[in-house]
Image (cartoon, rainbow, N blue to C red):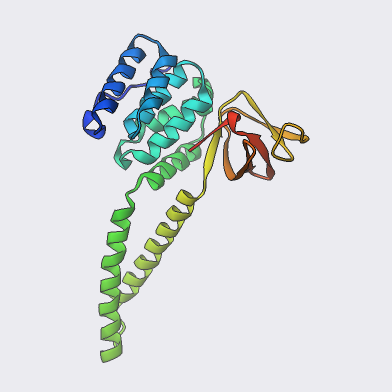
Amino acid sequence: MKYIPMILLCLSFICNANDQETFLRANELYKTRDYARAVDEYSAIEKKSGIVWFNMGNAAYEQKKFGKALACWRKAQRATNMFKQGDILDNIALAKARGDEKVVAKQSAMNKVRAYGYAKFVSFPLWLIQLLALFLWILALQGLVIFLTQKLWTGRLTGTLLSLCLCGWFLGARWALDATPGAVITTQSAAVRSGPGLDFQVVGSLPETTEIITEKQSSGFYQVRTGSLVGWISSADLERI
């Protein structure tokens, strides 16, 4: 089995003293291979950083809980610096393959590029794009003033407006993604029902590690969507990300 790297202690990201103690205790449990208790300790940390989510995913993976591990690593992906995504990407690929390294090795280059691009997209700091957009707005206004007063349309103004449109697209896409509630199937097979309850007809099933979109909640069930399949899944069968 491929070695899943465990991020070294970085307590500066865990401010609460109690959380620091819990984090250290969880790491010790992980080292002694008491993975179930390690997950419980990581879960007890109130303010979870990317490191906490990453380590919790490692502990879940060692228990062969691939859906739980994937959910944790997806959360780590969003909370981690865009330049430190390598280990997370490797682990996500392994979780989606349910630990089968041969499946990971056969992944196409396009799939790897797509996963890499998605990782950069979800982890890129929004404040940086917002700052760039503000700067571009200032340049655009200056260019428009020149155009209105001197009737001179410059190439710089064209480039500024195109860059501003690109920033607007990026911000809109990120806000839409952040506003879309996602989830991961954490049980071996989750029944998809026609309504929110065990009495409703089963219309399909989803295997572990399937990533879905949750739309609304009722009676302990979530209405979910993945591809053309729409239905209701018990909250016990998934973890939201």
Where's residue 91, x and y in %?
Answer: 43, 27
User: Quick check: 232 above or below 142?
Assistant: above
Q: Nearer the viewer, residue 79 or 1?
A: 79
Where's residue 55, x and y in %?
Answer: 36, 24
**Relative side of 191 to 160, left or right:** right
User: Quick check: 203 above or below 133?
Assistant: above
- Residue depicted at x 30% and y 54%: 127
**Relative side of 172 to 220, left or right:** left
- Residue depicted at x 28% and y 55%: 128
- Residue depicted at x 34% and y 48%: 124
Q: How many marks?
A: 0
- For the N terminus, give its image quadrant: top left
User: Quick check: 185 above or below 130?
Assistant: above
In which quarter of the view is residue 188 placed? Answer: top right
Most distant residue in the left direction: 12
Whether residue 93 is visible here, answered yes or no, is: no
In which quarter of the view is residue 166 placed? Answer: bottom left
